Image (spheres, grey):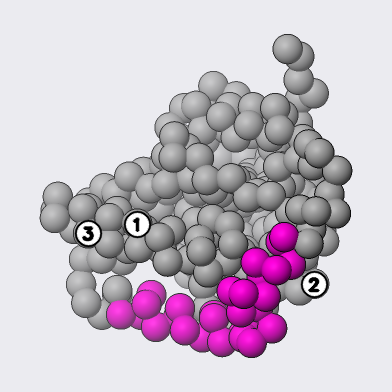
Amino acid sequence: MTFDLLSVSVVIPVRNDARMLEVCLRALGEQARRPDEIVVVDNGSTDETAAIAERYGARLVTEPVPGIPQAASAGYDAATGDIIARLDADSRPGPEWIERIARTFEARAELDFLTGDPRFYGATPLVHWMGRHLYIGGMYAVLTPFLGHAPLFGSNMAMRSRAWRMLSEEVHRDEPHIHDDFDLAFHVRPDMTVLRDRGLVVDVSARPFQNWSSLRRRLSWVLPTVRLHMPEEAPHRRRQARRRASVASPPGR
C-alpha cells in the first residue's frame, strides 16, 4: 500500500519553561521522521524561551495575551502543515512519534483528530499511578460518553489542518481558565472522527500532581469549560447529532 505523504507541523505553547522546552525540541530533532516545521508560541516568557526556540530552528510566534487557549490557538493558526500535532513544553516524544502520527492520518482519510496517552516522569511511582489511572483514566472514562468520542489530550494530540480551520473561530480562545483541549473536543462536529491511539505515548511531567494546589487548579478549570457548552452540547444532544451524521455520511467517511 502506498500513502500520500502529509506535512506535519508541531505546535508547542510555552511560558517560562525554557529548560523543558529545550529537552522537547531536542527530542523532536531526533525523530525518525522529522516534522516539517515546529511552531513555538511564546506566551509572555521572561526566560530564555525565545532564544532556545530559535537555536533549535523553530518558528517563534509571540502571543502576549496570557493563557494556554490563546497561545495554542495562535500556534494552530500559524501552522502550515497538513497535520497539526501538539505537545507541551514538558512533553518528551519518543523517536517514532511523528512517524506514527503521519502514518495514522495517511492510512485513514476519514480521520480528523488523533489523541494519545501520557507516561509520567518526575515525582514518585504513586504520583505516576494516580496521574495515569485516576486523572487521565478518569478523563477518558467520564468524558468519552459525555462527548460521544474520546477527549483530546493537549500534551499528545494531532489534527488535520482542515479540521482546525473549520473550528478556529468557534473555540473559546479568550477564556484563560479553561482546558483548551477539552474545549476543542466539545467543538468537534458530529461528522468528524476522533481516534484514541493507546500506542501513541509521550513522556509528560508529573508536576501537575505533585501537590494539591497544582492539581486543584487544573480540576477547577473543568467545570468552567463544561459550562461554556451547556445546555446546547448536553450529552443526549451530542449523541443525537452523531447518530444523524452517521446516517447521513457515506460508507468509509
Q: Which residues are magenta?
A: 216-243
Q: Is residue 63 visible?
A: no
Give the mark toward the camera: 2 or 1: 1
- Residue under pointer 1: 137
Q: Which element type, helix, strand or loop, lies under badge 3? A: helix
For discs 1 and 3, the disc positioned in front in the rendered view: 1
Secondary element at image label 2:
loop
**On the image, numbered disc 2 is attached to which residue?**
169
Please say whether residue 117 is visible from this viewpoint: yes
Count neighbours of disc 3 (C-alpha within 10 A) and say few if under 14, some if 14 to 19, many if 20 or more: some
How busy is the neighbourhood of tag 2: few (under 14 within 10 Å), some, or many (20 plus)?
Answer: few
Tell which circle, 1 or 3, labels the residue nearer the N-terminal end: 3
Give residue 184's quadrant in the image: bottom right
Residue 74, labelled with which disc? none
Residue under the image location 42 percent in, 46 percent down: 117
Classed neighbour count for the residue bearing mark 1: other residues with Cα under 10 Å, few (<14), some (14–19), many (≥20): some
Which of the image's four quarters has the C terminus? top right
Vertical placement of 93 versus 129: above or below? above
* Residue shown at the point (29%, 74%) measured from the top left: 215
**Amino acid type of disc 2?**
Glu
- The chief SS type of the magenta part is helix
Give the camera-side residue of 144 and 78: 144
Amino acid carrying label 3: it is Met
Name the residue at 40% across, 53% down. 90
Q: Are marks 1 and 3 in contact (CB under 8 Å)?
A: no
Tell me residue 77's x, y (percent). Answer: 76, 60
Residue designated by label 3:
130
Chain-order first, disc 2 or disc 1 = 1
Label whose residue precedes the other's in the sequence (2 or 3): 3
Label 2, label 1: how far apart the Cα atoms are? 30 Å
Q: Quadrant of residue 68?
A: bottom right
Residue 237 or 125: which is nearer the viewer?
237
